Structure formats: C-alpha cells, structure tokens
Amino acid sequence: MKAITGRQIALELEQIPALLRCETEWVVDWIERRETGRAGLYLVLIFIGSGLYGAAMGCWRAPLQAFYTALKFPLVIVLTTLGTTLLNGMLAPLLGLNISFRQSWLAVLMSFTIASVILGSFSPLAFFIVWNTPPLSATTEIPWLAYNFTQLAHVAIIAFAGVAANLRLLRLLRALGGSAAVARKILLAWLASNLFLGSQMSWILRPFIGSPGLPLEFLRPDAFQGNFFETVFNAARRLISF
Amino acid sequence: MIETNPASPLPTPPALPPGRAATPPLGTHPEEQVPIASLVAAIEALLRQPRRVMFQLRQANQTHLTALLLMIAIICALIYGFVAGTFSGGEQLWAAPIKIAAGLVLSALICLPSLYIFSCLSGSQARLGDVCGLVAGLLTLMTVLLIGFVPVAWVFSQSTESVPAMGSLHLVFWLIATYFGLRFLYDGFTQFKAESSDGLKVWIIIFLLVALQMTTALRPIVGKADTFLPVEKRFFVSHWADCLKQ
C-alpha cells in the first residue's frame, strides 16, 4: 500500500486515478478530513476538465464561442453544486446517511470531478469530431445532419461521463456507511436535485454550441426569461396539438 | 404535575402498528438524552437525530423546546417567503413572507385540536403538550427543508415570468418538505403506543387539504394583486384550475 498521508495526497495529482477507480479506502478518508486544499483541487480539475470539453464544444461555431463555453460549462457544474448543497446536505441524513453538509458537498463535488476528468479526456475526441465537421461559421443556416451528429456525440460522451461518475458516487455512499438501499435512495434524490437545478443553469447560460444565425455572446439577451421546463412543456404541448 | 418520563410504569402496552414495532423505546441511546438548548442544535437534531427531538419533547420542561422549534419554523418560513416574493418584487417582498409563515402556523393551529382528538381515539398516551411539540417539529422540519430549496427557488424566480410555473414549483417543494415533516410526525406518534395509526392517516389528509386551501385563502403568494387578501372566496382546486388555464 502507498505510504502517503492524507495531507500529502490532497495536494498531489496522484489522487486522480484513485478517485476515478473510487478506491473507497482513500476516498472515504478524504471525505472525512477537513481539507480546503482538496476541495480547491477538485474545483481546478472541474474547470480544466469540463472547460477543455466546453472549448471543444464551442469551437465549432467560433474561437470566441469556444472561450465562452470553456467558462460556462464548468460554471454550470459549480453553480449547480453550490445551489444544491443545502438541500443535498439535508436529504442525506433524512434518507438514512448521517453525514455533514461539508461531506455531502464534497461527495457531490467528487462525482462532478470524476465526470469532468472523463470529459477532459474526451475533449481531443470532441475536437476531432468538430475538425471533421463542416464549419458552422461558414454557413448562415444550420447544417442539420452535421449538427445532429455532433449533438448526439456530445450527448453520448456527457451521458457516459455522468453515468460513470454516479456509479462511483453510489459506491462512495455505500462505503460512507449507507446500506445499498439507502445509498440508492440518496443517489436518486441528489440526482433529481442536481438535474433539476443543472437544467435551469444550462438554460440560463446557453448557448454552448452556438448558432450560425445568431451573434456570438456570452449569454443570450433573454437568458433570464422563461425556464428549461416551461420550454420543454410548451414544446410537448405544441407537438401534441399537431 | 404530570409524569412525563416514558419509562414510567404503564399498563400493558398495546401492540404497535406493523413494521414499526422493532424500534427501541425513546431514550435508549445516551445521545437521545442530551438536552437541546440552541437553535442550531435543534435543526441538527431534527435532521440527524429525530429520535432525540422526540425524546426531548416528552420531557417535563419541553415547552422551551416547542417554542424554540416554532421560532425556527417561523424564521425559516419568513426567509423562504422572502425568496418567493422576489418573483414579483414590490409589496410581495414583505407580503409573501408574512403569508407563508402565517399560513403554516394557522394550518397547524386549525388542525391541532383534531390531531389531539384522533390521537386519544387511537389509544395513544400523548398529552396535548406532546402533540404540540410534534406539530412544532413537523413545521420546523418542513421549513428547514424549504430553506434547502431556497437557491433553486431563487434561480427559477429570476428566470421565469409564468405564475402557474412558479406556483407549481413552490407546490412541489412544499410537498417534498411536507412529506419529510409528516414522516417525523408519524414516527413520533408511533412512540406513544397508539393501537392504530388510521386516525393519524386521516389527520394527515386533513392537514394537507387545510394547508392547500390556505394557499388560496391567502392568495396571491406568487404574483401580484390589488389587495393584501383576496376579495372572492374560492376553493383551491378551482383557483388552481383557473391559474393553469391562463
């Protein structure tokens, strides 16, 4: 076994593989320790990993869009994590796992870190997809075939990162003392709260890919008008009325 | 003076409802016997050690704890109400907190006598003070959980203009919070050696209906109006149906 103390590990990137493997022996110890350095490291990893992937996503439209999306993608993750801290921290003990707010926040942050590291590792692939796709900036209309393919590829990669991260979070919740049933309940509750707020955050911070017919901008002028669920609901209603 | 120690000699205890009989008596664990003195300790205990709150509520000097719980519930309801009020701004910034806090307390006060009666009818050993304490715990857990929803509610308040959408969102948050609050109340009552929990289940329906009607009686909580309270009397189902048609 590695003879590394928790304090040393906090500042070393060596912990990333252990985190990805979710070596519960280490990870539970990290969660239980009160180390701000580790949370800082996770935040840096989130900004690098999902930032790189965001850049790959946005570069199809323009370099400036790549820069914007590189900032916005990690922002969605961090703001969602912060926004649901209180709720997730309350839900864990209520559903049977007595962990502190800090521990629940760190557990969620860890899972987002894992997802971001996976996304970062897929960013060369995403860049490659964009490089092989007709440029979005050269047209005034959306090339739907390429657009749909790129969108689907992003969805598949993000879904893979999300599933992998959540499977590790489930393992971590079990290791933290919850039974399999309790861990599953907490994971579902946390997923619901994170997805709910995360969807709205991504709606506010849109666009991520960009559209050839619309100007390049950090936020849409109507960013704070309407919400994700209302739009989905109205789209479904229109679809049914046809 | 009324003896409040749960370990006091009682007649042969009736059977607990199925599925709940396995829980040990309150106060078995030493940490449940630690008094709850502060606001933060009460919130922590409600979330992490609900049995400690239940045990403390059965002690002789529990009025202090009940008052503390009520105070937390009112403060949390006011905070959540303020965030709900940011949707419309203006007068709603003070009207919504007052309406939400008053609505919760009024709903509890209206339903409290029936809860005590149902509790007696079901053969429970709970005193009025115990019932008040458990209802205070219900309100506190509900509103503390609502505080957990505050960041989410605020984000949606700032990014939508639809009153039905925002109203539905608050309703979903309230239902989730109420579920956990009622679970605390239910668990609390199982400690009072009731012969049946049917009365409590009926009371839960009554409480939900009263609280839902309160959202219509004190309208608007989300959105604006010319008067502080509505002029027209309406049933909450018809009011909500009209809101959704807009």
Image (spheres, helix red, strand yellow):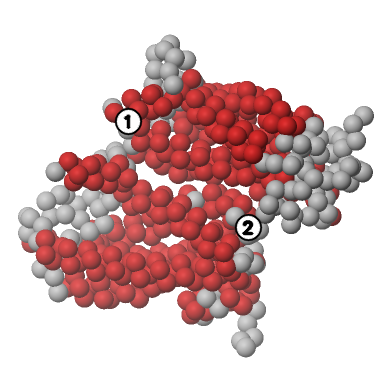
Residue B41, above or below A10: above
Mark 1 highlights which residue? B244
- Front position in the image: B181 or A37: B181
Q: From where the camera sits, is residue A54 visible?
A: yes
Mark 2 highlights which residue? A96
Which residue is painted at 87% across and 46% down in the image?
B12
Q: Amino acid at mark 1?
A: Leu
Label 1: few (<14), some (14–19) or many (≥20) C-alpha neighbours in 10 Å: few
Label 2: few (<14), some (14–19) or many (≥20) C-alpha neighbours in 10 Å: some
Residue B51 image offset from top left, x and y in percent: 74, 49
Which quadrant holds residue A210? bottom left
Which quadrant holds residue B23? bottom right
Give me the chain letter of mark 1: B
Q: Amino acid at mark 2?
A: Gly
Which residue is painted at 80% across and 42% down in the image?
B56
Q: Are marks 2 and 1 on the same chain?
A: no
**Could you tell me which secondary element the residue under label 1 belongs to?**
helix
Q: Are marks 2 and 1 in contact (CB under 8 Å)?
A: no
Residue A71 image offset from top left, x and y in percent: 34, 58
**Could you tell me which secondary element the residue under label 2 belongs to?**
loop
- Front position in the image: B47 or A61: B47
Tell me if B181 is positioned left or right of A136 in this view: right
Q: How far, Cα to Cα, is label 2 from label 1? A: 37 Å
